[in-house]
Image (spheres, helix red, strand yellow):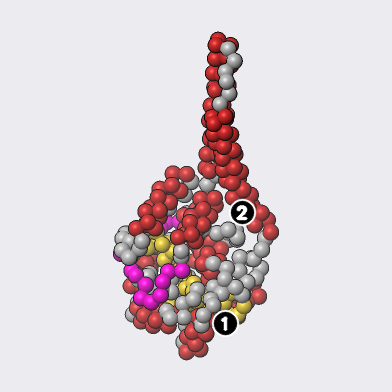
Amino acid sequence: MKSVELIVPCYNEEQMVEIFYEKTNAVVSEIEGYSFSFIFVDDGSRDQTIQKIKGLAAAHDNVKYLSFSRNFGKEAAMYAGLKMSTAERVAIMDADLQHPPELIEGMLKAIDEEGYDSCSARRVSREGEPKLRSAFSRLFYKFINKMSDIDLVDGAVDFRMMTRNMVNAIVSMPEVQRFSKGIFCWVGFKTKWIEFKNVERLIGESKWSFWSLFKYAIDGIVAFTTFPLRIATLIGTCVSSAAFIYLLFVLIKTLCFGKDVPGYSSTIIILLFIGGVIIMALGIIGEYLARMYMETKRRPIFITRETNIKEQDDESDKK
């Protein structure tokens, strides 16, 4: 019987953790040939999430948990769960039940019967999601796929099943500024995609605001491509070339027709344009330098406040 661990990042999900466990456990208990356990990762929740999780752990032997000292973000929570896992098969799921547990059986078959190293879910509809967010999401996937060497699948979510070998490869990348969707692609391995329609939350609202998603997109772009730096170089070259051509034009015009009267408005416009280009280029460079700065600090990705995973307690703060 193969072991399977389900990693469940949680942030302010006190209303959902028990519902999630009951429904998901009911589904996986019907799958033969596997033993399932849950690793709930409390990402510094401000409500009673950790108390609900501890209640589940006290009542069920297949529930493990890890609680952060503060909110480190979902990326850190996923990394912590993967790092703590020891099973032969490991999956990541959201606690809001937007990742249908009914897909788990098919994911396991893809790995154990079809020879894949990973099986991931891909959302093919965005019903219930704001249209502006959907449009920006599709634009992001097109943008990053053209700029980087990785190939992100449009609609890909964090819900995926992985072999132990793939999990070890992901955990071996201890970068602080994490973008897991890119990391999953970068490590390679053979992946099968399962399509599903968007499922709305049963209770509560998404913790992802438009601004947080925008910052997450910037993290992904900076983490897996240096193309923005090349854009800044290209724009700088074009502006410099245009300025040189304009200089030749003014010089020839002055020599042929005499001294030209300088225009105040055109001068201000040119100065503002060039200044804007310089500031933009510095901003792009600053994004990369900021991430280099954070990486050189070598701060831990997460800090454990409490856990019932005793064998991993001593190592959880080292990376």
Q: Is residue 17 above or below residue 298?
A: below
Q: Residue at x 54, y 73 (%)?
A: 43
Q: Residue at x 47, y 44 (%)?
A: 147
Q: Which residue is mark 2?
A: 291
138 or 34, nearer to the observer: 138
The answer for how far apart the CA atoms under marks 2 and 1 are is: 33 Å
Crowd band around label 2 with a 10 angstrom C-alpha radius: few (<14), some (14–19), many (20+): some
Instruction: Give the magenta-colored segment's residue range.
Output: 189-207
Question: Residue lying farthest top?
Answer: 256
Q: What amino acid type is highlighted by mark number 1? A: Asn
Q: Residue at x 37, y 72 (%)?
A: 201
Crowd band around label 1 with a 10 angstrom C-alpha radius: few (<14), some (14–19), many (20+): some
Q: What amino acid type is highlighted by mark number 2? A: Arg
Please say whether residue 152 is visible from this viewpoint. yes
What is the secondary structure assignment of the residue under circle 2?
Answer: helix
Please say whether residue 193 is visible from this viewpoint. no
